[in-house]
Image (cartoon, rainbow, N blue to C red):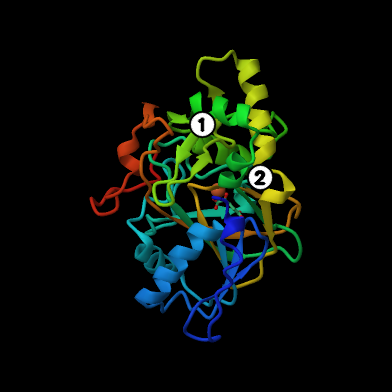
Amino acid sequence: MSTASSTSVKVRTGPSQGEPATHPITPVIGAEISGVNLARVDDAAVAAIQAALLDHKVLFFRDQDITQDDQIAFAQRLGELTGGHPTLPSPEGQQFVLELDSLLGGRADHWHTDVTFALEPPAISILRAVVLPPVGGDTQWANTQAAYDRLPGPLQRLAAELHAVHTNAYDYSRPVGPDGDEPTRRHRDQFTSTVFETEHPVVRVHPETGQPTLLLGGFARQIVGLPFDASRDLLRVFGTYVTRPEHIVRWRWQPGDVAIWDNRATQHYAVNDYGDAHRVVQRVTVSGARPVGLDGWRSEARKGDNGRYQAGFGARGGSLGDN
Ligand SMILES: O=C(O)CCC(=O)C(=O)O
Ligand SMILES: [Fe+2]
């Protein structure tokens, strides 16, 4: 049995300070971790967080009074960082950070896995609440390992044979026409300022757990070898398994919250229900491996300069945000 439901009964307990305790939110996805200050974690706490992340796919930490530098330092304990984003600018002097500001069009209101249009999508994303609306602005995550596990056999076998092309020039569910607001249009223009296309297996083997997961989401534009309409219908069918209520956790943010997700086993959706209220989050991403399918096939880049988004980028002193 390979879904998180088999492991989530392991409720780890521990003292409220200094040792992480894991509190599952659903049997399938999501756990709150208490007893941790992310600005001061020892190696044992990092190991416990890594193990809990593989089990629960997304972890939530309340009351973290941490700075952006603390967030970056913690993320570096989990692995080498990517640049903030392949095409969006980072805040001044913060090359590892992606800031999403609702007033500047930063609303990720579609189901997606982060940066799957790149050859090596991030392994882990770490998100910190900076400004929250009075109500609304929750985020949902879905378990793509559970989605694969619970596909009927014929669909599992079909998925395992398929590849999909992912791109940042994807079909937005809410197109910005001539009447669209200017910040949203500017954000989208920047997002697609360099077009990336990558061919990924639809089923990827998680490099740490060895479990198959569905690698799809909003950047998956077309199944290779299928006509566009059939491709879209099939993507929708697989998508319905990902976003089933049984595979989802929904987080109501509070000031001081940090969320960490396994980007190799999840999709997420930032609920856009707070109108003109202000919401700002900052993300840091740990670099990931090139995905591998069940048959050993490895993802291939088709378009875009992935060198700007790979491990070691920061160490090489590159800069993002000028394109
Ligand atoms: O705004 C959020 O809650 C999530 C945004 C998002 O998609 C991300 O940080 O990757
Ligand atoms: Fe995202």
Separation of disc 2 and disc 1 at Cα? 22 Å
Q: Where does residue 113 sit, x and y in percent of width and height?
A: 54, 43
Q: Where does residue 2 sit, x and y in percent of width and height?
A: 54, 50
Q: Secondary structure at mark 2?
A: loop
Q: What's the residue type where badge 2 is placed?
A: Asp
Q: Which residue is mark 1?
A: 202
Instruction: Check the image and report above or below for 298 versus 206.
Output: above
In the image, 54: left or right of 95?
Answer: right
Q: Where does residue 187 sit, x and y in percent of width and height?
A: 56, 41
Instruction: Check the image and report above or below for 226 versus 146.
Output: above
Depth order, front residue of 206/258: 206
Q: Which residue is mark 2?
A: 109
**Disc 2 and disc 1 in contact, CB within 8 angstroms:** no
Q: Residues within 10 Å of mark 2 (few under 14, many from 20)?
A: some
The residue at 56%/25% (across/down) is: 158
Q: Earlier in the sequence, mark 2 or mark 1?
A: 2
Disc on res. 229 = none
Query: What is the count of numbered marks?
Result: 2
Q: Is residue 305 visible?
A: yes
Q: What's the residue type where badge 1 is placed?
A: Val
Residue 279: image quadrant is bottom right
Instruction: Check the image and report above or below for 175 versus 18.
Output: above
